[in-house]
Amino acid sequence: MRKPLLVALPLMISAVTGCASNHVGANLPSGSMAYAVVPPAAATITVEDYRIGPLDALDITVLQEPDLSIKAAPVDAAGNVNLAMIGDVKAGGKTANEFAREVAQRYSQRYLRNPQVSVVVAKPVAQKVAVQGEVVQPGVYPIEGPTTLLGALSLAKGETQYAALNDVAVFRTVGGRRAGAVFNVAQIRSGQLPDPQIQSNDMIIVGYSGSRRAWRDIVNSMPLLNILRPF
């Protein structure tokens, strides 16, 4: 009676090792190459890291130029802000400091000498990130301010027991094109890799590990296998 059991176990273990995961990150850059698409977060994340988005409102001050300063300047759906004398200036995707430098450069080209410009995000619109795949609560979640991959996963209550932690893909629009990269969350948590910066409208998909599910099924079946043991 022992022989069939001894034969069955290696076959089941072989089945586990042969189970393929559902690779959501197939053909996407990984490892160090992934951070070229989704850069790592700064060591200390602050409000200064916030990226301006469509429909935000900005307070723009040009020192000693009250006619050029504006309160609650709207960012349109394309990410532009319309300013006196220089027209539309791209703000979407930039930090407040980056946008201030852009505005100062535009004014200095034709109208002002060494303009001093400051920008404050007066009314940030709630941004969002989608978290799908093997997480406890998939969905679309609002994010306020800078967020990392681990932070976004925590919004979805973490991953399920069948998640492939080496197959977590982040998709975003870069230069008008959809791009993606795959990350190893286990290595990020252990400090071996940096935690990537998540932006509004990113989509995160946690892959499925078929081998984890198969092994769980085997473990659950062990009490039944014990019935086959001789008395």
Image (cartoon, rainbow, N blue to C red):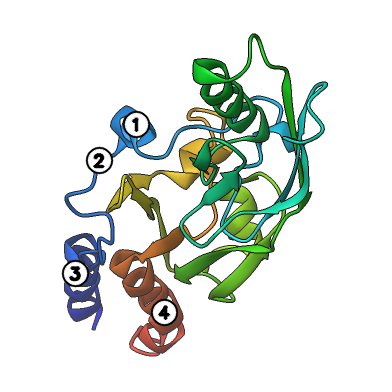
Mark 2 vs 1, N-terminal side: 2
Q: Nearer the viewer, residue 19 or 81?
A: 81
Instruction: Give me the residue at 71% from left, 32% from top.
Output: 48
Of badges 2 and 1, nearer the viewer stands: 1
**Which residue in the structure is indicated by mark 3?**
15
- State the CA–CA distance, disc 2 to disc 4: 40 Å
Dot 1: within a 10 Å radius of its alpha carbon, few (fewer than 14), some, or many (20 or more) residues?
few
Sooner in the amino-acid sequence: mark 3 or mark 4: 3
Count of labels in the image = 4
User: Can residue 109 be seen here?
Assistant: yes
Tag 2 or tag 3, which sits nearer the N-term? 3
Q: CA distance from mark 3 to mark 2?
A: 29 Å
Residue 213 position, x and y percent, is 37, 73
Q: Name the quarter where the C terminus is drawn.
A: bottom left
Q: Horizontally, is 27 left or right of 101 in the view?
A: left
Using the rendered view, name the quadrant where residue 107 is placed.
top right
**Mark closer to the observer (2, 4):** 2
Q: Please, what is the three-letter code of the amino acid marked with disc 3?
A: Ala
Residue farthest to the top, as pictured: 114
Per the rendering, the mark at residue 222 is: 4
